[in-house]
């Protein structure tokens, strides 16, 4: 079985500060890993995706994430927060082996950005 | 424009009155899935479909039905809705179960309230 843990439900940063959203996963086989963003009253938009190529993945809007197998982590970072980054962020894992046909999501983290 | 279209966006209904939420994609995707989003629980998979006439249960299938008679459409059916099915529903599609270069493409969501 696969699972995703996103510790905490809310992160607040100042505009211009580093954004760090943590994600740890559990998977018995090599995973695909995703970060999605959900703005208020909208659907989910893909930020970035790890598919076993480069371990450091760059996404849209200046976000990036690093896959660390030894730590089973895929933390999302952005060097400088912008007010427009305020949203809910979901980490998700899927199974490369074919045994499990779904995308499993974490519970999400709400990011607030203070002026 | 490549997209997943859900209808309706908002729906208020009464307990026991059958309803259908439609989902259509124009990307010729084989894989489609339904999720529900609840506060503090993230997104949980209801049903998924690997292709036409191939569907299977996700994590929370009770009280729901689906069908996949055409590749582009994947309706979600609530035969006898109950208040615990009040939620935000998302349809998603992808070229494959593990997601393509764009990951999963999500619809804009359907906010369902059952009174």
Image: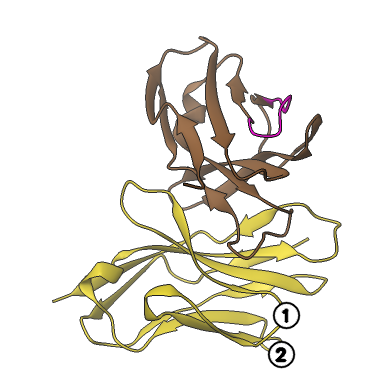
Chain colours: A yellow, B brown
Q: Is residue A19 above or below residue B56?
A: below
Residue B15 left/right relative to A16 = right
Mark 1 touches mark 2? (CB < 8 Å): no
Judge by depth and name the residue closer to the eye, B111 or B28: B28
Q: Nearer the viewer, residue A49 or A30?
A: A49
Question: In the displayed image of the protein, which residue is found farthest to the left?
Answer: A115
Compared across the picture, whether A21 is left or right of A70 comes to left
Whole-number angstrom distance, CA of label 1 to CA of label 2: 14 Å
Measured as percent of width and height from the top left, residue A28 is found at 82, 71
Sequence-first disc among 1 and 2: 1
Which of these two is toward me, B51 or B39?
Answer: B51
Residue B58: % across, % down: 71, 42
The image quarter in which residue B71 lies: top right
Circle 1 — which element?
A: loop
Determine crowd level at label 2: few under 14, some 14-19, many 20+ residues with C-alpha closer than 10 A: few
Q: Which residue is mark 2?
A: A70
In the rendered view, would you say A15 is above or below A94? below
Looking at the rendering, the stretch of residues picked out in magenta corresponds to: B66-73
């Amino acid at each position: 079985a696969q699972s995703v843990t996103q510790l905490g439900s809310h992160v607040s940063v100042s505009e211009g500060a580093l954004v760090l959203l943590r994600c740890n996963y559990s998977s018995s086989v090599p995973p695909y890993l995703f970060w999605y963003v959900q703005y208020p009253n909208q659907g989910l938009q893909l930020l970035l995706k790890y598919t076993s190529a480069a371990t450091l993945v760059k996404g849209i809007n200046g976000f990036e994430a690093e896959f660390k197998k030894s730590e089973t982590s895929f933390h999302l970072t952005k060097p400088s927060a912008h007010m427009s980054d305020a949203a809910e962020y979901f980490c998700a894992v899927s199974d490369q082996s074919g045994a499990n046909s779904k995308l499993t999501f974490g519970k999400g983290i709400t990011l607030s950005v203070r002026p | 424009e490549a997209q997943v279209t859900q209808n309706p966006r908002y729906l208020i209904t009464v307990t026991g009155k059958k309803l259908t939420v439609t989902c259509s994609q124009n990307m010729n995707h084989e894989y489609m899935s339904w999720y529900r989003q609840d506060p503090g629980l993230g997104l949980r998979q209801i049903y998924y479909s690997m292709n036409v006439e191939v569907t299977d249960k996700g994590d929370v299938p009770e009280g729901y039905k689906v069908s996949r008679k055409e590749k582009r459409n994947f309706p979600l059916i609530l035969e006898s809705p109950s208040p615990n099915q009040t939620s935000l529903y998302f349809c998603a599609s992808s070229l494959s179960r593990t997601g393509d270069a764009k990951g999963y493409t999500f619809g804009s969501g359907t906010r369902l309230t059952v009174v």
